[in-house]
Amino acid sequence: MRGWIDSFIEALSAEKGFSPNTCLAYRNDLEQFLAYLRDSASGLLRRGKKVDVRDVDDMVIRSYLGFLYNKNKKSTIARKLSALRSFFRFLVKRGVISANPAETVLTPKRGRPVPNYLPVDEMFRVLDGVKGESVLASRNRAILETLYSTGVRVAELAGMDVGDVDFDRGFVRVIGKGNKERLAPVGKKALTCIRAYLDKRGEATGPGIQGGEPLFLNSRGGRLSTRSIARLLEQVVRQLGLLRPISPHGLRHTFATHMLDAGADLRVVQELLGHASLTTTQRYTHVSIDRLMEVYDKAHPRR
């Protein structure tokens, strides 16, 4: 089974164009399933036995989901089941098995949690929370301003190069999920912070920053990781004493919510966020109940 997992991951990258992060997530889910098959105490397979994909049926998968149930959120279980469906669908297409054993297994019903976001005043406190004029402080200000200004995913921000920023037209080039490219507008404040950071970086490392260099560097001169970006945001939030925790993805939620509250069209926000489906974007409308009530009160003839 491990060999087929390797082939499947290679196909995701080469044929589907999935990003390294997405391929890694698929691999982790499938490796966890393989570990369950090898170590299961339920007698599905003996410990140490090579797992043949033809031995896996729908009952094995149902047993696995039961194993996951008390340890994982429903959304996590649904994602792992989706990975299994894709994997076995791949094997069916390759003629390894005749039917997909995961196809008949029902996906756990998931709730629709309200995305965590910050009100405008708290968001501005976060953006103004980085003090100092060092290269590090300038970098951190530019990161927070860019996340809020563009609504990009943290992995998309970490993957940006200097040449991806168009200072003249006010756009950044973004490589999203599935290596899909889009242009995202970026505000003047964020551009000013990016420019200030690059100027200070040039003073420290010497002029002549190339367009192919990472936009945001760590202390060793390498590309800044997504985890480092999350840590710097955690530090700012902690220093400000904000009552609600917020992640880099929470700034993406905040961007979308503030845009919709200000009257932006849902389709436009979908394009800005790089969502393939409008359904994904629609969940942000649930957090704007105050805005909905305001519009209702103004528009309904028998309010």
Image (cartoon, rainbow, N blue to C red):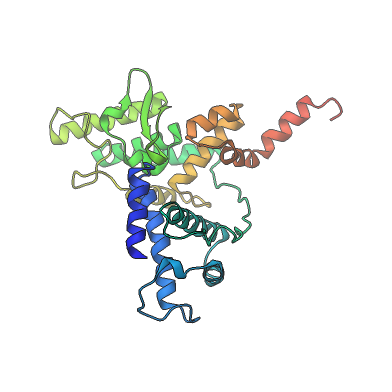
Q: What's the residue at 45%, 49% (across, down)? A: 247
Q: In which quarter of the image is residue 110?
A: bottom right
Q: Quadrant of the N terminus?
A: bottom left
Who is closer to the viewer here, 143 or 11?
A: 11
| Left-right relation of 55 to 65 | left
Residue 220 appears anywhere in the view: yes
Q: What's the residue at 54%, 36% (across, down)? A: 256
Residue 231 appears anywhere in the view: no
Q: Quadrant of residue 302?
A: top right
Name the residue at the right extreme: 302
State the image coordinates of residue 246 (x, y, percent, origin top left). Answer: 48, 49
| Left-right relation of 189 to 212 | right
Q: In which quarter of the image is residue 137?
A: top left
Who is closer to the viewer here, 242 or 37?
A: 37
Who is closer to the viewer here, 298 or 168?
A: 168
Asked if 45 appears above or below 255 in the picture, the reply is below
Who is closer to the viewer here, 97 or 43?
A: 97
Name the residue at the left extreme: 206
Q: In which quarter of the image is the C terminus?
A: top right
State the image coordinates of residue 187 (x, y, percent, origin top left). Answer: 42, 25
Q: What's the residue at 50%, 81% (across, down)? A: 42
State the image coordinates of residue 168 (x, y, percent, origin top left). Answer: 33, 17
Asked if 270 appears above or below 17 in the picture, the reply is above
